[in-house]
Amino acid sequence: MKVNIRRIAKKEEEQVTIECVEITPEIKDIYSYVLTKGKELSGVENGRICRFRLEDVCYFEALDEKVFAYTKSHVYEQKIRLYEAEEAYREHHFVRCSKSMVLNLMQLDGISPALNGRFFAHMKNGEKIIISRQYVPKLKQIVMGGE
Amino acid sequence: MKSRHFGKEIWIEFVTAFLICTAGICMLEGIMGMMFFPEERFGYEAFFSPPLFAFFSVGFGLVTRSRKELSIRQVIARHILHLALIEAFVFGVNYLSGVLFSWKIGIALALAIAIIFAMVYTVMYMNDRKSAALFNEKLKQYQEDAANREG
């Protein structure tokens, strides 16, 4: 298979085009790889550097000057600030839910009210985290639009 | 991100609590008046007492707010403080206006204030439950749309 790389000026116009006679499993693999490539992260777990998919992250949490990414069964230490994660992954449905957490809306199972205008976020990994009252309107705006 | 939506929500919350509280105080004054002071008569100025008490009672709710993230225990402690402030305010106003009543009436009043307090928070909680149910419905749609868009 021929592989061409053409340099372009604008980052936002970067793209991969696959030209094929038919969509074989190999082509599907390449397609999946390209799709996930930009969304793959690396983090430290038990002293080992591991790679994991951004979409598997339920939430990021800042604890003692460190940021951790929580997936269903793993916790990875990240070399990124929480606000950087919030900004970098906004397009991937990550949104701030408290001063110390950024959650993945795609991994959110639902919310329920807590005391004092706050809400519990029930994540798909079974964890329950707090949504602070000042972040509730923004969250509602993203999911519910103008309602 | 704190936004203007947060400010709007605070006002909606304040007005909702104020209206529920005013309604509760009207009922409380009516019931307690009929029970303990059936012969008393008031002028039109009496109509201002429920919204005034409601305004201050809801205003004392500022003690439940904090810039810091409060733990559940701290939230409960602040709600107890809120109720204590309302009780002290109502009894203080009665005392300063020269209204004297028996222990029996005092206990009934304190209980009635606590009931209205609980009623306001219950209605607000029910409202949050309703809004959470709507959010959850829209969340499923949001997730489906996003999954379809991103293949």
Image (cartoon, coloured by chain):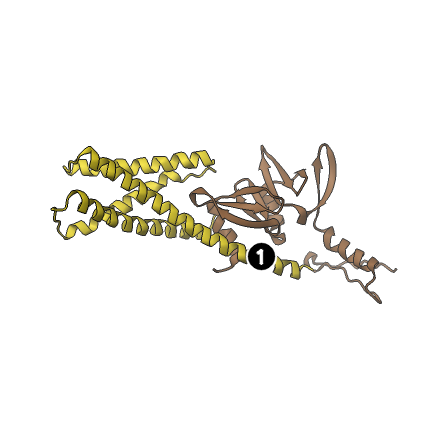
Instruction: Find residue B98 and report its image quarter.
Output: top left
Taking depth in this image into account, of A46 and B38 the one nearest to the observer is B38
What chain is tagged by disc 1? B
Residue at label 1? Answer: B140
| Residue at 16 percent of width and 50 percent of height | B45
Viewer-proximal residue among B23 and A89: B23
Q: Nearer the viewer, residue A29 or A89?
A: A29
**Image quadrant assignment for residue B91:** top left
Residue nearer the viewer, B15 or A111? A111
**Residue at x 70% of width, y 58% of height:** A10
Q: Which chain is yellow?
A: B
| Residue A116 percent across, percent down from the top left | 42, 43
Which residue is depicted at the point 50% across and 54% down? Answer: B133
Question: Seen from this angle, which residue lies furthest bottom?
Answer: A21
Whole-percent x, y for residue A82 in the image: 59, 41
Q: Position of residue A29 (x, y in %)?
A: 80, 56
Q: Which chain is brown?
A: A
Q: Position of residue B3 (x, y in %)?
A: 47, 50
